[in-house]
C-alpha cells in the first residue's frame, strides 16, 4: 500500500513529466493526475488530515517547482464555505484537481481585453475531478468549497510561478469589473 507521500510524489512527478513542452496536453495530464487520486484517495485523505484540521484559513502549500519550462505544483486547503474572489492567473495555463472534498469553479473568458468578461460556465469537482485553462485566452475564475463543515484539498499545476495576479470585483449591473493587483502567498513546502 502506498503512503500519502508516495502519492504526492507520484502527482508531482506526473506533473513534471507531462509539462516538458511550453503548451502541454492538459487533458491528458488531468486524466493521469485523476487516476492517481482515485487510486490513492484514502492515503491522501489520511496523510493530509493535518491540513484539513489546522483551521488557519485558506492556504497554499508548495509541492514542487521547476524552471524551463516553468511549472509549479501546489496543494491548497479550503476552509468550509471559503470562496476566492474572481481572479486571473497572470496568463499562465493551469489545472485544478480535487484531492478531498468538493469545489465549485465558476469561470469567465473574453476574446480580448477590450471586451467584457463572459460567463463560460461552472464545474463541480469531487476527488480526482479536474478543470483546466489555457494561457492564450484572457481567463478568470472563482472557486468555492461546497462544504459548510469540512476543509477541501486541491492540487494545482501552473505553467510557471503564480506570484502576482489580479482579483476582480463586479461593479454594478453592467459587465464591468474593477481590478485589484494581488500577491500570492505560500504557507510552506510539502515534503515528499
Image (spheres, grey):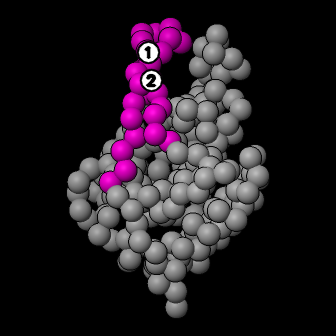
Mark 1–mark 2 distance (CA, rounded to whole Å): 5 Å
Mark 2 Cα-neighbour bin, 10 Å: few <14, some 14–19, many ≥20: some
Q: Give the range drawn in magenta.
A: 162-187
Q: Is residue 116 left or right of residue 180?
A: right
Determine whether the residue tagged by mark 1 lies in a helix, strand or loop.
Answer: strand
Rendering quarter of residue 149: bottom left
Mark 2 residue element: strand
Res. 10 image quadrant:
bottom right
The total number of labels drawn is: 2
Contact (CB < 8 A) between labels 1 and 2? yes
Q: Which residue lies furthest to the left in this view?
A: 55
Residue 27 seen in the figure? no
Q: Measured from the top left, where is residue 100 in percent x and y?
A: 44, 64
Q: Which residue is drawn at 58% across and 46% down?
A: 160
Q: Mark 2 points at which residue?
A: 168
Q: Is residue 16 inside the magenta stretch? A: no
Q: Position of residue 113 (x, y in %)?
A: 63, 16
Does 166 sit above or below residue 114?
Answer: below
Q: Where is residue 9 in the image (x, y as percent from the top left)?
A: 54, 73
Please name the residue shown 23% across and 57% down the image.
Answer: 55
Numbered label attached to residue 178: 1
* Quadrant in the rendering for residue 97: bottom right
Badge 1: residue crowd in 10 Å (few <14, some 14–19, many ≥20): few
Up the image or down, 142 lies above or below 100; here it is above
The earlier-in-sequence mark between 1 and 2 is 2
Amino acid at each position: 500500500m502506498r503512503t500519502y507521500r508516495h502519492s504526492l510524489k507520484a502527482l508531482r512527478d506526473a506533473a513534471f513529466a507531462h509539462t516538458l513542452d511550453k503548451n502541454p496536453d492538459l487533458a491528458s495530464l488531468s486524466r493521469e493526475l485523476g487516476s492517481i487520486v482515485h487510486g490513492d484517495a484514502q492515503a491522501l485523505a489520511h496523510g493530509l488530515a493535518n491540513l484539513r484540521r489546522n483551521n488557519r484559513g485558506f492556504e497554499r502549500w508548495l509541492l514542487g517547482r521547476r524552471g524551463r519550462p516553468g511549472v509549479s505544483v501546489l496543494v491548497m486547503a479550503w476552509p468550509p464555505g471559503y470562496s476566492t474572489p474572481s481572479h486571473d492567473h497572470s496568463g499562465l495555463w493551469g489545472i485544478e484537481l480535487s484531492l478531498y472534498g468538493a469545489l465549485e469553479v465558476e469561470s469567465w473568458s473574453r476574446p480580448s481585453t477590450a471586451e467584457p468578461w463572459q460567463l463560460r460556465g461552472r464545474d463541480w469537482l469531487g476527488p480526482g475531478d479536474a478543470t483546466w485553462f489555457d494561457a492564450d485566452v484572457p481567463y478568470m475564475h472563482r472557486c468555492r468549497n461546497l462544504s459548510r463543515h469540512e476543509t477541501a484539498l486541491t492540487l494545482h499545476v501552473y505553467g510557471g510561478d503564480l506570484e502576482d495576479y489580479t482579483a476582480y470585483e463586479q461593479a454594478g449591473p453592467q459587465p464591468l469589473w474593477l481590478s485589484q493587483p494581488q500577491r500570492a502567498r505560500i504557507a510552506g513546502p510539502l515534503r515528499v
